[in-house]
Image (cartoon, grey):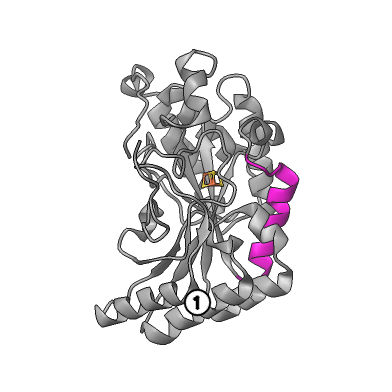
Amino acid sequence: MSKKLPPEQIIIRPPVEAYSVLIAVTGGCSWNQCRFCGTYKGIYGGGQDYTIRPLEDVLRDIDQKVEMNYHGFPVFLAGGNPTSAPTDYLVEIIKYVRLRLKNVPRVSSYAKALDILRKSNEDLKRLAAAGLDIVYMGLESGSSEILRIMKKGTNAKSMIKAGKKVLNAGIKLSLYIILGLGSYKYSEEHVKETARVLTAINPTIFRFRTLNIMPNTPLWKEWKSGEFKLLKPIECLKEERDIIANLGENVTSQVFNDHVSNYCAIESSNIKEDREKFIETLDAFINDPRIQNMQRKNLTRM
Ligand code: SF4
């Protein structure tokens, strides 16, 4: 059995942070129960326990980046959910990043809705004032039933509350949605409720990912036994189209399909303006016989 990875080892970051300076703040995930997620459960090596790294270690890593002359890049505070750490600790790290590294265009981190709900509005405003620009949060689905089945630890109501809290504090919010997370049984509900929650939050950005089932996740066994089914590529694209079609008129978010798991790469800088074109493009994919005949593959390396 492989050894657990130390907290300073960064396992994952958003694709958009590929050219950013990565600073490990927490290791693992404080929740680590989502049934579809294997990130910290051992798909990469032996897994990683939840840890808040000592402040002096994080500040030393920032000093090292300064020595390496990494000025002018975005900074990603890494770990499953650094926002689970105390606000004073995070403020000190963000301020130190802003002090030591010059011309940093963006400071970001992953966040879990529960972390956001545990923080006060004042805490979040302090993080924004220190220089935290954006958090990436897994909505996954707007359906409370799917979130319950997948053990996300949050429901639609608390997702809406957390999302609004982030935005009201002056921090940008990027949400992830997983196409196919409700399989066939809950596909319609996944579409309807995800569109409803996105409409209620109107996040700065939302991003689509397609469900792929990793070994070491609780969902793996269910998929292998045939109990849980993966949607076909065309059905994932239809879910995406229908989510976009069901959004309220108020939604002005940027939308991205910026992941290797996606079956299309289309994007919008304002879905209110681009909605018709976006749907037309998705329909062109959906009506393409090559997509219609495409078999579903489960990616286990991404
Ligand atoms: S999806 Fe996010 S919150 Fe859920 S276990 Fe994975 S890292 Fe943790």
Q: Residue at x 34, y 40 (%)?
A: 2
* Residue 223 painted magenta: no
Other-residue count near label 1 (Cα within 10 Å), few / some / many at <14 / 14–19 / ≥20: many
Residue closest to the far left: 68
Q: Residue furthest bottom?
A: 99
**Which of the 4 quarters of the picture holds residue 103?**
bottom left
Q: Is residue 20 above or below residue 79?
A: below
Task: Determine the main secondary structure of the stretch shown in magenta.
Answer: helix
Specify whether residue 71 is in view: no
Q: Residue 161: within the magenta? A: yes
The stretch in magenta equals 152-170
Give residue 176's position: percent from left, percent from top: 52, 47
Describe the element under mark 1 as helix, strand or loop: helix
Residue type of the residue flagged with mark 1 = Ile
Name the residue carrying label 1.
94
Looking at the image, residue 78 lies above or below residue 158:
below
Picture residue at 61% right of the left edge, 38% below the top: 141
